[in-house]
Image (cartoon, rainbow, N blue to C red):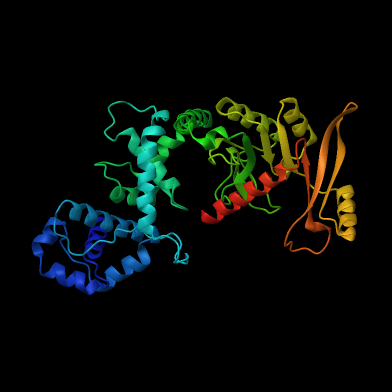
Amino acid sequence: MAQLFRLFLLKELHGWTHETALLTYLTHHPELRELLGIETVPDQSTLWRSWHKRFTSELRETIEAAARTILIKAQDSGVAVPREPERNFPSQDDGADKSEPDDQAILNEAGSITDYISHVVFPAFSLNRDNGCEIHENAYWALQTHLGLREGLAANEGARSFVYESTRGRTPLGHAHREHIRDLSIEQIREMYRRAINRLLGEVAETEEFFRAGIVAIDITEAEPFTGDRTGHEDEIIGTKEKTDEYAYQWATVQLVGNAAPIVLDARPVRKGEARKEIVEDLLNSAEDLVHVDNVLMDREFDSQHILEMLSQRGLSYVVPKRMQTSERAQAKRLLQRGQDRYETDRKLHLGKNEWHETTLIYRRKEDSEHDDHRQYSVFMTNTSSAYLTEYGYRWEIESGYKSIK
């Protein structure tokens, strides 16, 4: 297998598309066969079967990536190479819109981002490694940034592409990178992340955007569906938001929105059975340690009256969409019959033990709705001015645009 690997690496270095060229080259270069430790050259059919039948797609991709890396490093060092290497990282989406920036433009921008955060963010993170390690710790964080700026890039392939994008002499291997990251607990990562955000906010503290900050959005997002073995992790890899039989990790985030720079202030995993009120309190505690918070925007999975009461007790205003129950559906139908686009009414929500939370329900008709019945209306709960509904709509429009870009 080792000899076959070397042979196919040689074939890829020269860019030959057929095994015949490789065999001809080896026939005329016996000294190379000796250097490669090849006593008997396999015949053409053996080579073809090995590449197409025995080698996995991952192994073939590894050989191709290794050849690209060797060619680029050799060319950068002034060594003659048998062919011009492809320096653009292969696109993750062959069907991407051709009007979008090409891969090289994205890589150039990614490089400037990495350079900037290396002096702002990296000092806040630590892998707790021995001082005698040969690879600098910042190389691990640079690789993590490299992975994070690209969609669907796994650690192994990312580490290979990072070799020829980075200017570092030595970079981490994919498996070593994963081991170091996995050694960090969630609590350690959150604490380091908060330190990094604090440093970043210090960079923008004098800007107009920062001083106009005061609105945060709390949201739950989920990773791609998990297809592995969940044994022992059933409380962490929970069901998806949609009612399906799929499972996924879920994360709750708190983010600056409105006129402020859209910075994620904190993030935490969502575990099975965890109360939404506990999640909101945890994220708000982090956010208020970093910035001044006036208003909280949340989506409808946080429409609990106990969460709303907690926000009011903290002196915070809120805008939260409400899941329609029987009374809300009936009201929406009446509004539709009257052709009324907007309606406000006060509502008391029962907290238990004869305690109530007072809120305002705002019905708003959606523009260009796909429905022709009461579903044209959305219902929001708020304890502040209805003007924040505009901010809420703007926040989710920005979020949708960000997800489409990703």
Q: Give the camera-side residue of 18 and 153.
A: 153
| Residue for point 21% across, 62% down | 10
Tally of marks: 0
- The residue lying furthest to the left in this view is 31
Quarter holding the N terminus is bottom left
Q: Position of residue 47 (x, y in %)?
A: 27, 68
Nearest the viewer among 218 and 63 is 218
Image quadrant where residue 131 sits: top left
Q: Residue at x 16, y 51 (%)?
A: 77
Vertical comparison of 88 with 198: above or below:
below
* Residue 252 is at least partly visible in this image: yes
Residue 24 coordinates in the image, percent (x, y)? 16, 72
Where residue 11 appears, as percent x and y from the top left, is 23, 65
Above or below: residue 211 compared with residue 115:
above
Name the spot of residue 384 as percent of width and height, x first.
75, 36
Above or below, 323 relative to 286 = below
